[in-house]
Image (spheres, coloured by chain):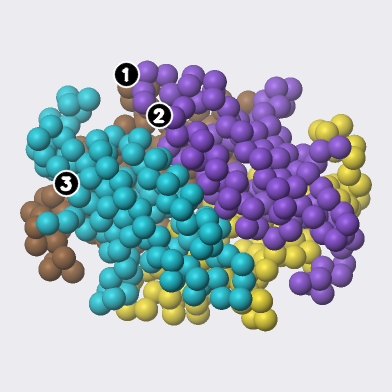
Chain colours: A yellow, B brown, C cyan, D purple
Amino acid sequence: MDKYFKNLTDRERAIFEGGISMGSLYHQFVGTPVNVDTIPSLEKAIEKSIMLQPAVIKVHVKLDEDLIKLMSGSNTYTSLEGKMLNVEITTRIHEELVTTCISYNEELDYPLMYIKG
Amino acid sequence: MDKYFKNLTDRERAIFEGGISMGSLYHQFVGTPVNVDTIPSLEKAIEKSIMLQPAVIKVHVKLDEDLIKLMSGSNTYTSLEGKMLNVEITTRIHEELVTTCISYNEELDYPLMYIKG
Amino acid sequence: MDKYFKNLTDRERAIFEGGISMGSLYHQFVGTPVNVDTIPSLEKAIEKSIMLQPAVIKVHVKLDEDLIKLMSGSNTYTSLEGKMLNVEITTRIHEELVTTCISYNEELDYPLMYIKG
Amino acid sequence: MDKYFKNLTDRERAIFEGGISMGSLYHQFVGTPVNVDTIPSLEKAIEKSIMLQPAVIKVHVKLDEDLIKLMSGSNTYTSLEGKMLNVEITTRIHEELVTTCISYNEELDYPLMYIKG
């Protein structure tokens, strides 16, 4: 695989793969029916599926229980939205490790994807 | 809720909700990264999320392990496709129960959605 | 195809296909980046793709411009949500026509899928 | 926005945003019903929606007409798959421009996401 990425440093490639995986996660799973009871199984399935993506060595998904409860209102469930996502994805290329995150940013009023550290 | 469905018999409404849930399942989860090891967690998350939809009382999801292995080829995973889906969703409106299915149909060469029985 | 649906009346089958197409539309396109300027191209692409589904003879998609503007806030775009959808899908099986709708229902506080008429 | 990306060079950030947008595009639109006639409207809607994403200044989408024809077989349409995608997304952060691509790679037997040049 390395030959396709000769124009990137290891760190750039780890950042690239982190971005791909975070964009993938967001657009694959936003819209999924969810309530407080199904949070654990959905978190686990998201983690396991994103772990399969290139260069990913660790995924931690925490869905916002309070917001899911709030958005469910008097209904029995809601749809997964970007602002419910708290995710960290670690990608590794050789010796370079990068952690890509998403979490709701109050100042910007949307879920921001960024690199930690 | 019943007042919004006065123009449907209970059976028609159970069929309607079965169709909605099967279309939802297909287009929500097709594209998800999957391999043989992540089949169980993905099956479980799909079942639990579709169970939340209106009128659904039972969901059984069986992903085609052989096809997932085949499509993964020499790679470590593949993307979930419609023809990998074997699903039964039971919907109930009052006394009427309907089971909506999807499975790959060889004659048609695509995953057919149909009502059982 | 008719042989796979011998257990349904023409009306039941038109309802089934309407439900499938509406569930498909919702879960395929929710999450798509959208703003006021891209509404027309997105509406058109949704209409054309759902027109391909079995039994569908007409699709009309109207995305809620005011809500898209509101949800964009001070940002340049937002993600498509279910409550932004106003859609009518007409399905036909032989002589039976059925129109399946989605629109935001204030009383229920969510986008309701229902059969018109 | 710059303050959230102080730990990245402009080039790293352009690469990050390119990765996010390509992962988003893939997982948002894979699964969409498509045939030869609807290719233009789908290409246009994808381009316009991805143009909205942060740092994106140009998007070119070319869906593989031959493969869509082949996969449709004797049916009237098929589902959009990753290997049908030929996409270039240009992202810009200040003076740094990066072009992120996806196309089917025969050697790897899957659609490869990479940085051009």
- As measured in the structure, the alpha-carbon distance from the residue carrying label 3 to the one carrying label 2 is 22 Å
Q: Amino acid at mark 3?
A: Val
Q: Amino acid at mark 2?
A: Tyr
Q: Nearer the viewer, residue C74 or D102?
A: C74
A5 in relation to D28, above or below: above
C69 in relation to D103, above or below: below
Q: Which residue is mark 3?
A: C98
**Is residue C82 something one can see in this rendering?**
no
Q: Which residue is mark 2?
A: D77
Q: Residue B92: image x %, image y %?
A: 18, 55
**Is residue C103 something one can see in this rendering?**
yes
- As measured in the structure, the alpha-carbon distance from the residue carrying label 1 to the one carrying label 3 is 28 Å
- Choose mark 1 or mark 3, whichever is in front: 3
Q: Which residue is mark 1?
A: B107
Q: Residue at x 81, y 71 (%)?
A: D2
B74 sits left or right of C45 in the view:
right
